Structure formats: C-alpha cells, structure tokens
Amino acid sequence: MSQNLILTVGLLVLAFVSGMLGLGVAFAAIPFLGLFMQDLVHEVQPLSLLLNGLTGLASTLGFARSGYVEWRRGAILAVTTTVFAPLGAWAAQHVPQFEIWLVYFASVIYLAWRLFRPVSARPGAEKFRTALLLAAPISVLSGLLGVGPGFLLLPTLILVGFEPKRAAGMNALAITPPSFSALIPHVGSARVQAHLAATLVVAGFVGSFLGARVTSVYVAGGRLRQMFGVLIVVMTAYKIFTLLG
C-alpha cells in the first residue's frame, strides 16, 4: 500500500471521528501526519490547519441539519478565535518544536482528565461569558500548536456547562474561520504537495460531515464527552510512543 493511500485512508477515519465530536481534524492529524512528515512547522502545521478549516465547515453542516448549531454564539466565538489564532501561529515560527510538543501533550492530558469529572450546571449567559473569556488564550495556544482552537474549545464549552451536542455544533462553527486565519503566517514558508493536499481535503470533508451526522442522530451527549476524552488520550499516547521510538 502506497504512503499516499495510507495517508488518505487514515485521514478519512480521523476526520470521521473528529466530525463526530464537532472538531476539525487537526488535533488528530498533527500526530498522524507527523509520522510521515518530518517538518512540524512547514509541512505538518500548514496542511493540518487547511484540513482543520474545511473539516470544521463539514462538521458544522452535519450538526446544523439536526439543529445543534447556535449560530449567534458560534459566530461571536468565531470572531474571537479568528482574531487571536494568528498570534500563536506567528509565535510557532520562533519557538523550538520540542517545546511546542510539550505544550500539546500537557494540554490534552489535562483536558482529558477534566472531561471525566462531573460538570457543574451554570446559567446560559454565564457559561457563554466564561467560554468567550477563555476563547482568546485558547486561540493563541492553538495557533502555536498548529491545530486550530477546536480541540481546546470543545472541552471548554462542555466544562462550562453546554450540552455536549450543542457544544460540538457551536465548536464546529467557531473553529472554521480561525483555522484559515492561523494558516496565513504559514503561506510563505509552507511546503505542501498540492496533489496530496487535494486528496486529503476531499477525504477529510466527506469523513467529517458523515461523522457529524452520526453523532447528531445516534450518539448520546454524555457518551460524546467520554469519547473525546478517550480519543485525545489515545492519540497523544501514540505520538509519545512514536517520538520515543
């Protein structure tokens, strides 16, 4: 099996799972693409951000069909994340790759731990204000990691009290524009094969839309929260294993 075929099939599967959670695929694509591409900043991050924006859009459409997208709140979050994400992407050009990976691992381990603890109920206005306050630093950190804000914003929305499916739908909308804005600082230095990128974009869009539809119809909200916690632990453990190997 050729490397490009492995990349395409793997990305399709990751996009399906990410779409189920209302995420762009970047948080899972970063360690996956890192197995085949050596340059994190100039190869992996630009491709991951492109895929993140398009799969986020596909996931938004999938959740919207079942009425799980809160358009006004999602749009406000999108504006915030779009403004701040490029700051992190710019910083990634000057921070050692090893330190970027340390931030990534520490972030996902902490969030996975929190997702398996009880979530306190809050009034709607209060939980949205809290999420909006956290959106700016989340966006800067996500831009630094090259993954888009979704992998941090989704658990934040859940932990401040949003029902998981609505959090996933709102998150999918909020991550789409900042994924593209965070890509801007990479444009001049990115080294991505156009043919491979186009193939992965198609696979990612289809997989993400189908994943969002499956969650909208068949997956319970509590199970969605647990799925996210398990997924980020598995992906992070696998990347640690490959780095040590």
Image: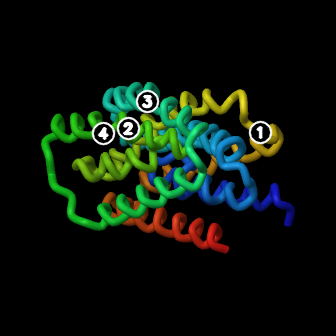
Is residue 90 rendered to the left or right of residue 125? right
Q: Position of residue 138 (x, y in %)?
A: 39, 41
Q: Residue at x 53, y 51 (%)?
A: 100
Alpha carbons under labels 1 and 3: distance apart: 24 Å
The quadrant of the image that shows the N terminus is bottom right
The quadrant of the image that shows the C terminus is bottom right
Q: Circle 1: is it few (<14), some (14-19), or many (20+) Cα within 10 Å?
A: some
Q: Position of residue 59 (x, y in %)?
A: 51, 43
Mark 1 element type? loop
Q: Residue furthest right?
A: 2
Report the mark closest to the observer, 2 or 1: 1
Alpha carbons under labels 3 and 4: distance apart: 11 Å
Which residue is disc 3 drawn over? 84
Residue 205 seen from this side: no
Answer with mark 3 or mark 4, whichever residue precedes in sequence: 3
Q: Circle 2: is it few (<14), some (14-19), or many (20+) Cα within 10 Å?
A: many
* Residue 46 sits above or below residue 214 on the image: above
From the viewer's side, name the closer residue of 131 and 202: 131
Which residue is disc 2 drawn over? 69
* Residue 204 sits above or below residue 174 on the image: below
Which residue is disc 4 drawn over? 134
From the viewer's side, name the closer residue of 134 and 116: 134
Mark 4 element type? helix
The three-letter amino acid code for the residue at tag 2 is Val
Mark 2 element type? loop
Answer with mark 1 or mark 3, whichever residue precedes in sequence: 3
Alpha carbons under labels 2 and 1: distance apart: 35 Å
Which residue is disc 1 drawn over? 191
Q: Residue at x 67, y 55 (%)?
A: 11
From the viewer's side, name the closer residue of 47 and 67: 47
Q: Residue at x 42, y 59 (%)?
A: 106
Q: Quadrant of residue 33?
A: bottom right
